[in-house]
Image: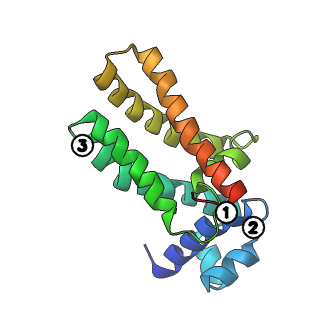
Amino acid sequence: MSEAKDKIIESSKKLFCQKGYASTSIRDILEDSGTGKGQLYHYFLSKKEICLEVIRAHSSEWERQCFEPLLRKMKNPEEALLAMLDWEIRMHKDEVQHYGCAVGNLVVELGAGEDEDFRELLCQLMKSWTQLVQARIIEITGWSQEKAQIQAQHIISSIQGNHLLLKLTQATA
């Protein structure tokens, strides 16, 4: 990937998290990324295309940093789930201003909308996360698929709810 494209994606990730997709303009992305309009439109035809690439980038990041090394490869399921929680905390630990979970914010803003492209990518990411947590819960408890899935959804909802409260209160303690 080119440096300009990377800058556009990284700036868009940050801006979509901080301001939301709808409130972020192409001009905002250009200014933050320090790229020109020609560069942006060389790689992306629209803000929607940028956002779809941002969702893919988040999915790839989560896969590399959490799903594969922690939830798939760690042998001990309890340690895997604790490592996942630690990863979530580390991702936000050094933030001065808390904007919430970048993916969670996109789910809230775009998940219930009419655009199936956004919903499909976001659903894939959440489904993967849920299934991985569910599998580790089954290893620990021996529960049925259904019961473990419900518990996995509760765990993920609690994590995302914590991000919402952190965003609201701006307090880490």
Specify the quadrant that holds the N terminus: bottom left
Whole-Å distance between the Cαs marked 1 and 3?
A: 31 Å
Q: Quadrant of residue 31?
A: bottom right
Question: Do callouts 1 and 2 mark residues in contact (Cβ within 8 Å)?
Answer: yes
Mark 2, mark 3: which one is toward the viewer? 3
User: Reading the chain from its start, which is encountered first: label 1 or label 3?
Assistant: 1
Farthest top residue?
A: 144
Q: Is residue 48 in view?
A: yes
Image vertical order of residue 108 relative to residue 38, above or below: above
| Mark carried by residue 115 | none
Q: CA distance from mark 1 to mark 2?
A: 6 Å
Q: Residue 172: image x %, image y %?
A: 58, 59
Residue drawn at 73 percent across, 39 percent down: 112
Residue type, numbered disc 1: Phe
- x, y percent for residue 38: 65, 82
Element under disc 3: loop
The disc, 2 or 3, on the residue closer to the chain's N-terminal end is 2
Callout 3 amino acid: Lys
Mark 2 residue element = loop
Q: Residues within 10 Å of mark 2 (few under 14, many from 20)?
A: some
Name the residue that disc number 1 marks: 16
Q: Residue at x 56, y 38 (%)?
A: 158
Q: Tell me the element at label 1.
A: helix
Question: How many badges with numbers are in the image?
Answer: 3
Q: Which residue is mark 2?
A: 24
Q: Going from the N terminus, do you reach mark 1 or mark 2 first? A: 1
